[in-house]
Image (tube, helix red, strand yellow):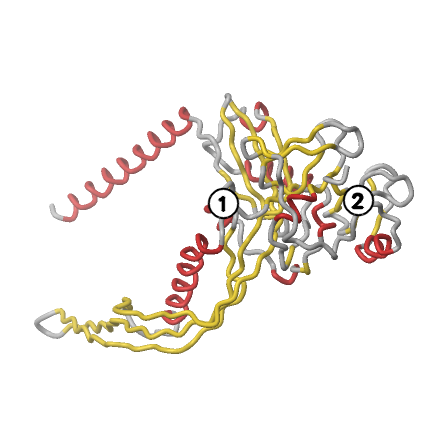
Amino acid sequence: MDNVQGYKCLCCGSPLVWNAGEQIWKCTSCDNTYSLDTLQAAQQSQQFADAPVDNINWNEYNVSETISDMVSYTCPSCGAEIVVDGTVAASRCPYCDNVAIMQPQVTGMIKPDYIIPFSKTKEDAKKALLKFYEGKKLLPDRFSEANHMDEITGIYVPFWLFDCETSADLTFDATNITKWRDSSYDNTKTDHYLLQRSGTLRFEKVPVDGSVRMDDAFMDAIEPFDYSGLVPFNQAYLSGFVANKPDVDVKTSLPRANERVINSTVTAFQSTVNGYATVLPKSRRVEAHEGTIKYAMFPVWLLTTRYLDKVYTFAMNGQTGKLVGTLPVDEGKYKKYMYTRAGIIAAIVIVLTALIGGVFR
């Protein structure tokens, strides 16, 4: 029993979950709602049987029972065994749907500095996926009807947030082109310039996801997250969602962070070079200073659908609602589209050939 922490309604004892739509904790049975202040006050007055959320030594707990990188727990409601991935910090009982926070996993990982609570609900995710289908002309006709959503899971994804200041020295090759016509010739004059830019930029909270199971391309695509929604981490926000602890460490994440910072620095300085026909980077020196790293959990809805025995995965920003994913292509529609396109191009070529032929007759 001590291995699992849940949050119970003070009225009926049923599980509480974070309600993204109402931005409050809600009882799954009697619909009573609770604010974070109420939960904390109840814990302090020992109305909850669980350990206090904010007074945990995060480095003293270790998961000892593992089976092929899986961890087993006992559900406090029905007594069933819950088996989850070794990186999962929160889950639901697959038998009674009881919300459970896996205390050894939460306390065994680094305590996050921040969390962005879910703002978009599961229903929002369903609607976003159906809207994503709209306007896709090559989508099979029966896809949205024949496929079904196998799973919609709200996941708190770990992110490393990098703060630093960059100093940069850059040079650019730039040109200006002047054209004129005199009585004899068409003239072109190209002036070449060597431009220099230098200065400093401050970066705050450059995100790099810390989960090997999350597709980096998906995580980049659903950005940005609105940092005005960042709040100090509190374990209660995990209620009703899956939470993965980071399995990509800071050292491994540094190259991605460096790449993002350097590219953003070069782009920022290059944007100050105006009034030229062409601008090409020639050399650069970018150095980062005063680097600090924070750890946060960001909300993501993962949706999987099945069509013709193939699974398609989509990811939605649980705060902003931005959704990305891949869709199947109807081969018949694709061939028809390419055939029609080729026919249009051929028709254009014939018309142009006829016009040109008419000019030179």
Q: Is residue 235 above or below residue 80?
A: below
State left or right for residue 119 relative to residue 356: right
Label 2's element? loop
- Label 1 crowd bin: few (<14), some (14–19), many (20+), radius 10 Å: some
Give the position of the C terminus as an image quadrant.
top left
Q: Is residue 300 above or below residue 234?
A: above
Mark toward the start of the polypeptide (1 vs 2): 2
Which residue corresponds to the image point at 48% horizontal and 68% vertical from the top-left?
Answer: 291
Residue at image point 70% right, 44% down:
103
Report x, y in % for residue 346. Answer: 26, 35
Q: How many marks?
A: 2
* 27 lies left or right of 126: right
Determine the residue located farthest toward the right in the rendered image: 11
Mark 1 lies on residue? 218
| Horizontal arrangement in the rendering, residue 54 relative to residue 289 (left or right) | right
Please, what secondary structure does the residue beneath circle 1 have? helix
Question: CB under 8 Å between callouts 1 and 2?
Answer: no
**Amino acid type assigned to the residue bearing label 1 in the image:** Phe
Distance (Cα) linking label 1 and label 2: 32 Å
Vertical comparison of 265 with 301: above or below: below
At which x and y percent is residue 93?
72, 32
Q: Which residue is mark 2?
A: 7
Nearest the camera: 98 or 21? Answer: 98
Residue 134 percent coordinates (x, y): 55, 37
> Residue 6's image quarter?
top right
The quarter of the rendered structure image containing the N terminus is: top right
Between 305 and 63, the one nearer to me in the picture = 63
Q: Is residue 285 above or below residue 113?
A: below
Residue 283 image offset from top left, x and y in percent: 27, 69
Q: Hey, which quadrant is residue 116 in on the image?
A: bottom right
- Residue 355 found in image quarter: top left
